[in-house]
Image: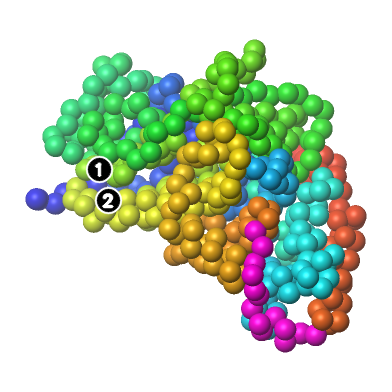
């Protein structure tokens, strides 16, 4: 193969995945590479499957697109998020807050939760994990403040994401790339000319023919750009997402609230001007298989992913590459990681075999590991006859997942695989939330006397409670922040 440099990249799709990809590429590509953005009007309808909650890493991801937090807060109804409050979850109707938080303390080389396990029998009132997590206590009170630089107060341990609506973020990202030197074309695809795995050109409905060295396909599951022989994993279950918005005058809380149902779950997400309602239903588990209510947007989907999203000179991003049930922050988190991986492996020549092989390997690792986290929400014995709870979209018999749960229940150890998207703190909160107890704790946790340990934990709880009482309600903090930004920047 004669090598030639990459001179032109074409991105297709005007949904969140395509806009994120274009904005990122516009920031990092050298002047010698032409970037074309073909905007289709067919791709935003599935964006609700990215969910309405982002992880803390989204702050830095947006900065990498040239979009700062003040712009997001003043141009959209985005609010701050401390995580998700799960209610009536699973066969035991579990109730806990899966919050964002910096690493928990480590005493004498022993992870924090081992000390709580030690006290579980002798002092159960001091062994509740949520009492020692600042973001959980703030979430329960509906209060918020930015974590300070100082490291000696509980608020410094808080991490936060955002509650957001994908269509509003599409607007601010689109406005951002309007300032870039990008050729933008509004048109749909008529046909694709291929030679083996390679795309030679794309003919648009307006008559234009797009020839490029590298194509990014963010058009969704039915895209004509996706290779007809692309192998898909999953797609065994049909689900429905119903979405609607209810206006309110102020922000109601600082967590998404997600409640389990017999055939799936419902969630409410607090935004600056109201609540976003999202329901996910397993259609095989729904008794009447009824349609969505009036005023709702409804789409049917099958959770699945491509085995090789990068094939030849075309990379599939977004819901054409993978559709995940938005139970956690995984959909938007993995989209961010996919785009960051693209930037890291951007091809420099027409021979893309090394880059595509590495991208596909890490893509599958990421989605496999995200499936482990989702699977841990379902890995409990259930008397329910519902297909949603008995046959989830992920494999709960996965040996890696069983190993994680077994090691935690046996020894209190969080097994972490390389580059997992969810942290040890995420797993610890999930295990505690699901009511998983351990048979034994690290014996080194006995190196601190019981009196000293109880005193240290009491001080920690008291400091968190005092800080939570001082923090303003989410809506008051947001109003003050926006007034400050307006006074400062106009």
Image point (82%, 28%), residue name: 249
Determine whether 80 is above or below 171 in the image: below
Q: Is residue 99 visible?
A: yes
Relative to residue 371, is residue 346 drawn left or right? left
Q: Nearer the viewer, residue 456 or 134?
A: 456
Q: Secondary structure at mark 2?
A: helix
Q: Are marks 2 and 1 in contact (CB under 8 Å)?
A: yes
Tell me, yes or no, whether the highlighted magenta stretch contains residue 446: yes
Dot 2, crowdedness within 10 Å: few (<14), some or many (≥20)?
A: many
Q: Which mark is residue 311?
A: 1
Determine whether 201 is above or below 124 in the image: above
Q: Nearer the viewer, residue 332 or 203?
A: 332
Dot 1, crowdedness within 10 Å: few (<14), some or many (≥20)?
A: many
Image point (29%, 26%), residue name: 224
Q: Secondary structure at mark 1?
A: strand
Q: Which residue is mark 2?
A: 356
Q: In the rendering, at what x and y percent does residue 476 appear? A: 85, 41
When asked about the image quadrant of residue 156, the answer is bottom right
Task: State the extent of the magenta-drawn residues as a range.
Answer: 436-449
Tell me, yes or no, whether the highlighted magenta stretch contains residue 77: no
């Amino acid at each position: 193969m004669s090598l030639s440099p990459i001179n032109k990249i074409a991105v297709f799709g005007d949904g969140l995945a395509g806009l994120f990809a274009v904005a990122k590429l516009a920031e990092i590509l050298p002047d010698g590479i032409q970037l074309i953005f073909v905007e289709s009007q067919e791709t935003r309808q599935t964006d609700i499957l990215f969910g309405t909650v982002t992880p803390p890493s989204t702050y830095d991801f947006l900065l990498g697109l040239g979009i700062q937090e003040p712009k997001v807060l003043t141009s959209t109804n985005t609010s701050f998020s401390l995580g998700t409050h799960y209610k009536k979850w699973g066969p035991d109707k579990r109730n806990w807050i899966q919050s964002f938080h910096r690493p928990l303390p480590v005493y004498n080389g022993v992870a924090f939760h081992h000390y709580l396990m030690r006290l579980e029998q002798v002092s159960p009132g001091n062994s509740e994990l949520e009492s020692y997590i600042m973001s959980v206590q703030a979430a329960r009170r509906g209060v918020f403040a930015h974590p300070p630089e100082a490291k000696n107060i509980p608020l410094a341990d808080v991490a936060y994401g955002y509650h957001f609506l994908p269509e509003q973020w599409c607007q601010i990202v689109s406005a951002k790339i309007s300032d870039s030197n990008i050729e933008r074309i509004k048109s749909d695809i008529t046909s694709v000319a291929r030679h083996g795995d390679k795309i030679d050109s794309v003919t648009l409905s307006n008559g234009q023919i797009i020839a490029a060295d590298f194509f990014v396909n963010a058009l969704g599951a039915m895209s004509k750009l996706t290779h007809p022989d692309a192998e898909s994993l999953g797609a065994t279950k049909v689900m429905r997402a119903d979405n609607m918005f209810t206006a309110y005058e102020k922000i109601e809380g600082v967590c998404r609230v997600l409640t389990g149902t017999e055939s799936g779950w419902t969630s409410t997400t607090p935004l600056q001007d109201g609540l976003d309602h999202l329901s996910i239903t397993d259609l095989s588990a729904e008794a009447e298989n009824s349609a969505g209510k009036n005023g709702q947007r409804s789409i049917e989907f099958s959770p699945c992913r491509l085995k090789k999203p990068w094939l030849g000179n075309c990379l599939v991003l977004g819901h054409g590459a993978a559709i995940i049930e938005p139970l956690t922050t995984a959909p938007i988190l993995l989209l961010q990681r996919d785009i960051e991986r693209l930037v890291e492996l951007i091809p420099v020549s027409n021979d893309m075999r090394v880059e595509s092989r590495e991208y596909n390997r890490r893509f599958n690792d990421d989605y496999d590991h995200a499936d482990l986290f989702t699977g841990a929400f379902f890995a409990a014995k259930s008397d329910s006859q519902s297909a949603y709870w008995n046959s989830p979209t992920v494999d709960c018999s996965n040996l890696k997942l069983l190993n994680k749960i077994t090691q935690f229940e046996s020894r209190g150890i969080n097994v972490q695989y390389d580059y997992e998207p969810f942290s040890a703190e995420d797993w610890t909160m999930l295990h505690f939330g699901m009511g998983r107890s351990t048979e034994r704790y690290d014996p080194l946790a006995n190196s601190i006397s019981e009196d000293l340990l109880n005193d240290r934990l009491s001080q920690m709880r008291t400091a968190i409670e005092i800080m939570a009482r001082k923090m303003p309600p989410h809506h008051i903090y947001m109003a003050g922040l926006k007034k400050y930004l307006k006074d400062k920047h106009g």
